[in-house]
Every structure is written in C-alpha cells, then in structure tokens.
Image: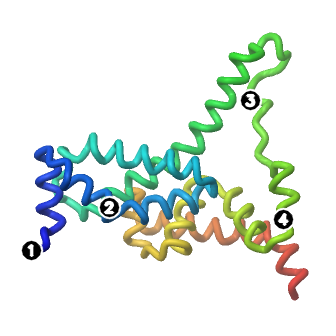
Amino acid sequence: MEISEKELIIKAQQGDQTAFEQLIYNYDRSVLSIAMKYVHDTDEAKDIYQEVFIRVFRGLKKFEFRSEFSTWLFRITTNVCLTHKSRKKEEMIVSLQEEFGEERMGYETKDLQYDGLSPEEETSGNDLGNLISTAVDSLSSKQKITFVLKHYEGYKIREIAEMLNCREGTVKKYLFDAVNNLKRKLKPLIAAEA
C-alpha cells in the first residue's frame, strides 16, 4: 500500500528517518536541477542541495500544511539559491581582507568587486548555450531565479510567487526585466543570426 505524502511528512515530523529519506528521494532531482541551473557548477549545486535538505530537516516539525509540501520545499530552495551567491561574494571579500588587510591594500574591499565576465566566460562564448548561460548568470538574483523557475523548470507564475513569497505581479516584473536584460545582452548575437 502506497503511503501518502501527508502521512510521510507526519511520520518524518515524528522522527521516522525512513519517511524523511523518502521525502528527499521524491524531490531530490528537482532541487538539484534548480540548483544546477542557477549556479552551473556541480559542486556548488551539491552545496545548495545539501543546505536545502538541512533546512528542510530542521524546519519540518514546524511545517503546518498551510501550503503544499512542494511549495514549501521549493521556497526553501529558491531562498538558498538567492543567498548562496551573495554568501560566496562575501566569503571572497572576507578572505581577501584576512589575507591582505584592508589598510595594507590601500583601497576599500568594495572596489574589488567585479561584476563583468571572467576570462573563462569570455573565451567560452563560442557556443550559443554558453552565451545564453552567461547572460542568464549576469541577471540579478531575483530575475535569475524567476527566469530559471519559469523557463527552465516550467513553473507557473502563481507557483513561483508562492515559492518566493511575493505577489504574482512582482514575479511578472522580475520576468519582464529578465527578458529585457537578456535581449539587451544577447542583441549582438541576435543581430548576427538575422
């Protein structure tokens, strides 16, 4: 007899390790897929995946069935993706400060932040997929996650709004801005194809 997701959740909330593992199994590919499309790096995606399920494990007892479990899980996933990128940038800045000391460098750490393409990204632009990935990566974190969830994962605007805990109009604005930014960034490519 197949156990329902609600029963799995209740058992996992009561400490049943097997039930929790089944919940992870049901969603692990989706979480990893979102993470991979957001960071384009297997190791970073695995870090996000692990952080998501740690947060799910810690927060599961507080889950009150006010939304679908999947909505709650993907809200955690999107939050981890959004904070992952900013945390990575902070780690780099902190490690530079520890290594050289801000005073010894003669300038402020904020001057070190580079938002352009890395040499690897510039040279990997031969492939259309790489160009598109680079353009998507250059979007703001909110634009990027909404674009990934809508166009790569196929979620509806209503579902994305629930995951991001915002209004549908806000999701539409993020998507509108993302598409306009992508058009602008890919304009030379589009002109070359025409």
Q: Compare marks 1 and 3 and give the one earlier in the sequence.
A: 1
Q: Compute the Cα span from label 1 to label 3.
A: 58 Å
Task: Determine crowd level at label 3: few under 14, some 14-19, many 20+ residues with C-alpha closer than 10 A.
Answer: few
Tell me how far mark 3 sits from mark 4, CA to CA. 28 Å
Q: Is 78 situated above or below 172?
A: above
Mark before the other along the chain sequence, 4 or 1: 1
Residue 119: percent from left, percent from top: 86, 50
Q: Between tags 4 and 1, which lies in front?
A: 1
Badge 1 marks a residue whose secondary structure is: loop
- What residue do we see at 62% from left, 32% from top? 90
The residue under label 3 is 110
Give the residue furthest to the bottom: 194
Task: Name the image quarter holding the C terminus.
Answer: bottom right
Q: Which residue is mark 4?
A: 125
For this view, does 178 lie left or right of residue 15? right
Pointer 2: what residue? 25
How many numbered tags mark residues here?
4
Q: Quadrant of residue 88?
A: top right
- Of label 2 and label 4, which has the lower sequence position? 2
User: Which is nearer the eye, 59 or 43?
Assistant: 43
Give the residue number, with chain letter if any, for mark 1: 1
